[in-house]
Image (cartoon, helix red, strand yellow):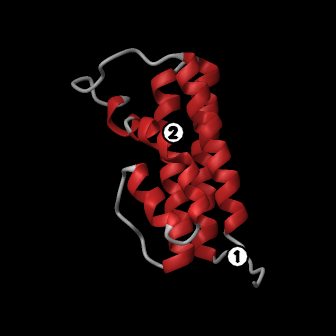
């Protein structure tokens, strides 16, 4: 197994993921729970897409985290461990942004959990980008 540095394209995606994580953290600290949940969803979506770009060199225009995880798991089955969390956080893509879809108020606990999972998936995925 070779240990190579991620490509420039991958590096650009990683920078966007890191911005989303900072955005989620900022929103969480400010009490903007829905926005923190959305930013965490975005970070996860982007890091999974980053991994797929790294592996198969194409952008997957999918927003559902479960689908992205399944594609990642084709390369590394360890991605499957976040299946249940991804199903919950995937809903934050729409539910946090559109009044017609918001079925409840988002909580500090949801925001903290989403950010924690986003950081875990990001750390795990980044460790796979040199393989």
Please give the name of the residue rendered at 36% of the width and 52% of the height, measured from the top-left corner: 63
Marks 2,1: beta carbons within 8 A:
no
Query: Could you say where residue 53 lies in the image, as x and y percent from the top left?
Result: 51, 72
Query: Which quadrant is the N terminus positioned in?
Result: bottom right
3D distance between C-alphas at marks 2 and 1: 25 Å
Query: Could you say where residue 45 lies in the image, as x and y percent from the top left?
Result: 48, 52
Relative height, residue 16 to residue 89 (above, below): below
Query: Could you say where residue 105 lies in the image, as x and y percent from the top left?
Result: 40, 15
Query: Which quadrant is the C terminus positioned in?
Result: bottom right
Q: Residues within 10 Å of mark 2 (few under 14, many from 20)?
A: some
Numbered disc 1: secondary structure: loop
Relative height, residue 88 to residue 8 (above, below): above
- Sequence-wise first label, 2 or 1: 2
Residue furthest to the right: 3
In the displayed structure image, the side of residue 110 where residue 103 appears, left or right:
left
Q: Which residue is mark 2?
A: 85
Residue furthest to the left: 100
Numbered disc 2: secondary structure: helix
**Residue 131 shows which numbered tag?**
1
Query: Could you say where residue 13 lies in the image, as x and y percent from the top left?
Result: 56, 62
Please give the name of the residue rendered at 51% of the width and 69% of the height, measured from the top-left corner: 52
Using the image as rendered, state which of residue 81 and residue 116 is in the foreground: 81
Q: Residues within 10 Å of mark 1 (few under 14, many from 20)?
A: few
Please give the name of the residue rendered at 57% of the width and 44% of the height, measured from the top-left corner: 20
């Amino acid at each position: 197994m070779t240990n190579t540095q991620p490509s420039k394209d991958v590096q650009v995606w990683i920078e966007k993921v890191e911005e989303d994580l900072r955005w989620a953290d900022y929103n969480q600290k400010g009490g903007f729970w829905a926005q923190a949940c959305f930013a965490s969803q975005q970070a996860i979506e982007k890091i999974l897409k980053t991994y797929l770009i790294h592996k198969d060199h194409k952008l997957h225009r999918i927003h559902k985290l479960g689908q992205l995880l399944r594609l990642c798991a084709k390369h590394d089955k360890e991605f499957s461990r976040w299946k249940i969390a991804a199903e919950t956080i995937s809903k934050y893509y729409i539910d946090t942004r559109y009044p017609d879809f918001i079925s409840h108020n988002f909580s500090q606990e949801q925001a903290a959990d989403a950010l924690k999972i986003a950081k875990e998936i990001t750390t795990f995925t980044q460790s796979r980008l040199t393989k």
